[in-house]
Amino acid sequence: MASKTVLITGGTSGIGAHAARLLIDHGHRVVVTGRDETKLKTFLDEAGHPDRLLGLVADAADWQATESAVTRTVERFGALDAAVANAGLQSGGSIGDGDPTAWAPTVLINVLGLALLAHAALPHLEATAQPIAEAIRFALEQPAGVDVDTVTVRPIGQPI
Ligand SMILES: NC(=O)c1ccc[n+]([C@@H]2O[C@H](COP(=O)([O-])OP(=O)(O)OC[C@H]3O[C@@H](n4cnc5c(N)ncnc54)[C@H](OP(=O)(O)O)[C@@H]3O)[C@@H](O)[C@H]2O)c1
């Protein structure tokens, strides 16, 4: 499969970072975002492949930062094939015993962040004219541990 360009929000540690490394290992181009510049730099230094890996400081709950991350991805690599809304929080607990002060930031990242990324990314995903079947094939062909099939924003309304 030809190499793809994938933007992963919250890709400087955990699942996002692991997915980024696997995609890089398989020859794809990856852009990761995170809020902490030091953490981002550490990840980029460890991951290597600066020709195919770009890191951007961006808060996934912020519209300007998200729009800028998508724009810079396309400027750097020429297209966007998949956008992975990975940045998120798990506030834990139930309505009864959870911490209400954690709920607003959780919703802003987990819900608003997804919508912001979709809005910014969709025109570029549509521009790749990538049929849905091709996008699903790309997701299915990822190595074990890359869960892009469930969290990837893809072009809609295109024939299979
Ligand atoms: N681990 C699990 O068992 C599990 C289970 C189900 C779902 N999930 C979901 O999977 C995703 C990743 O989980 P994880 O365990 O890998 O998380 P993690 O280890 O805490 O890593 C989170 C990553 O996201 C970044 N991040 C956090 N908030 C951000 C924001 N507002 N904007 C941009 N980047 C942000 C962090 O960097 P900065 O702090 O520098 O921003 C970091 O790179 C999350 O959405 C989580 O809710 C995880």
Image (cartoon, grey):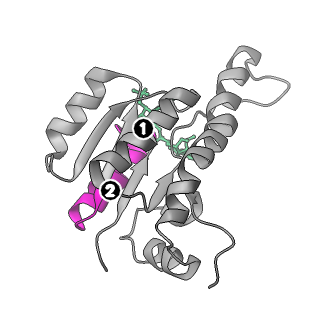
- Farthest residue toward the top? 101
The residue nearer to you, when weighing 76 against 99, is: 76
Tell me, for residue 69, which label it has, or none.
Answer: 1
Cα distance, mark 1 to mark 2?
Answer: 13 Å
Let me know if residue 17 is in the magenta part.
Answer: yes
Q: Is residue 144 left or right of residue 90?
A: left
Q: Where is residue 37 in the image (x, y as percent from the top left)?
A: 30, 22
Q: Quadrant of residue 132?
A: bottom right
Q: In this view, does 60 lie to the left or right of 156?
A: left
| Residue annotated with mark 2 | 78
Q: Do the residues labelled 1 and 2 touch (CB within 8 Å)?
A: no
Q: Where is residue 20 in the image (x, y as percent from the top left)?
A: 33, 52
Earlier in the chain: of badge 1 and badge 2, it is 1
Residue beneath the point at 68% across and 35% down: 112
Magenta stretch: give its range. Answer: 9-29
Neighbour tally class for label 2: few under 14, some 14-19, many 20 plus, Cα within 10 Å: few
